[in-house]
Amino acid sequence: MKIAVLPGDGIGTEIVAEAIKVLQVLDLTFELETALVGGAAYEAHGHPLPDATLKLAKAADAILFGAVGDWKFDKLERNLRPEQAILGLRKNLGLFANFRPAICYEQLVDASSLKPELIAGLDILIIRELTGDIYFGQPRGRRVATDGHFPGAEEAFDTMRYSRPEIERIAHVAFQAARKRSKRVTSVDKANVLETFQFWKDVVTEVGKAYPDVELDHMYVDNAAMQLVKAPKKFDVVVTGNMFGDILSDEAAMLTGSIGMLPSASLNASNQGLYEPSHGSAPDIAGKGIANPLATILSAAMMLRFSLNQPQAADRIESAVKDVLASGLRTADIYSDGTTRVGTREMGDAVVAAITKKTTKG
Ligand code: IPM
Ligand code: MG
């Protein structure tokens, strides 16, 4: 089991270190190799995704990724910014299927800004298409307008586009995921305005005919944004395009109390995957030892389940995380009165301890 470890920037190094600690107590043998990515790679090698890093990632069964980005790189030209590393990995490895589960842990019901009854027991899965849409559509750029409201003025443009096979494959992923859950898929689009998303809706509907056991409904993205805070438990599997998925997955994350708890998986057609916390590099708290490592630890569990075929090891990590939350330990982002505030390392240590305790008990 070859794992490329790409901690990246900001809190990335701190949280990935905790996930590695957890992987190492599982009695499995991993080949771990670490490389620079994002702003850290730019500073050392002049590019956020150096060839050596990409090569390592391609050769691995899975990639454990921290986070990239820092305000100090905001002035760089776009293709050198840290974010290009994650976009480049998604594109080069064909990681088209992004899984972003939003689960509200019983003990964290009060950490959400929503009323407890709205989110207690919440368990939704956002499936975001990750290599198409306006993120990657060509052409894009800046030019002088020859038409539109202001001919002769400077303008910028991007292209929203989806091909049939791109929609079909992500739709299959969503229907198959739904079969393992409560057999409901909500496809989110903007078919009332956008040609791209009328096509999306048509293709998802066609694919759905092969899954008569799965209930499919369609929702416009603006309504979905509203329903997510009004009645989030009505959703089960949500499938949507790259940009809508970016926005809705952050919204869904906050339903659970803290984005510091949310793992993610990005898979290609051969189940090779990149695993990263849904949160970013949080440069404001980097180096302080207070970041929540649980999203990364839970991402490592997803890695074991989806790419490394070790579902039992994944279960052990997930149940250890629940035990640690039940014992009252909290990092700052999920802290509330009556719980015990701990730092990044103490949280990682606690997960390790919970795993080893269960192991010795048999
Ligand atoms: C995410 C992030 C990325 C995205 C950025 C860092 C490029 O927001 O993974 O959701 O927009 O996809
Ligand atoms: Mg995002």
Image (tube, grey):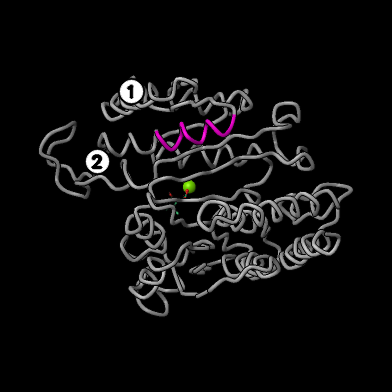
**Depicted 82 relative to depicted 115: above or below:** below
Label 1 sits on residue: 206
Quadrant position of the C terminus in the picture: bottom right
Residue 15: which quarter of the image?
A: bottom right
Residue 214 place in picture, x, y as percent: 49, 23
Residue 72 place in picture, x, y as percent: 46, 67
Helix, strand or loop under label 1:
helix
Q: Earlier in the sequence, mark 2 or mark 1?
A: 2
Asked if the stretch drawn in magenta spans residue 174, the answer is yes
Q: Which stretch did the figure color magenta?
A: 172-181
Amino acid beneath label 2:
Thr
Dots 2 and 1: beta carbons under 8 Å?
no
Relative placement, left or right, of 17 versus 85 is right
- The overriding secondary structure of the stretch rendered in magenta is helix
Residue 80 place in picture, x, y as percent: 34, 66
Q: Which residue is drawn at the image coordinates 37% and 79% (left, top)? A: 45
Judging depth in this view, the residue of 240 and 280 nearest the camera is 240
Amino acid beneath label 1:
Glu
Q: Marks 2 and 1, how far apart in space?
A: 25 Å
Label 2 sits on residue: 159
**Depicted 150 relative to depicted 287: above or below:** above
| Crowding near the residue tagged with mark 2, few <14, some 14–19, many ≥20 C-alpha atoms within 10 Å | some
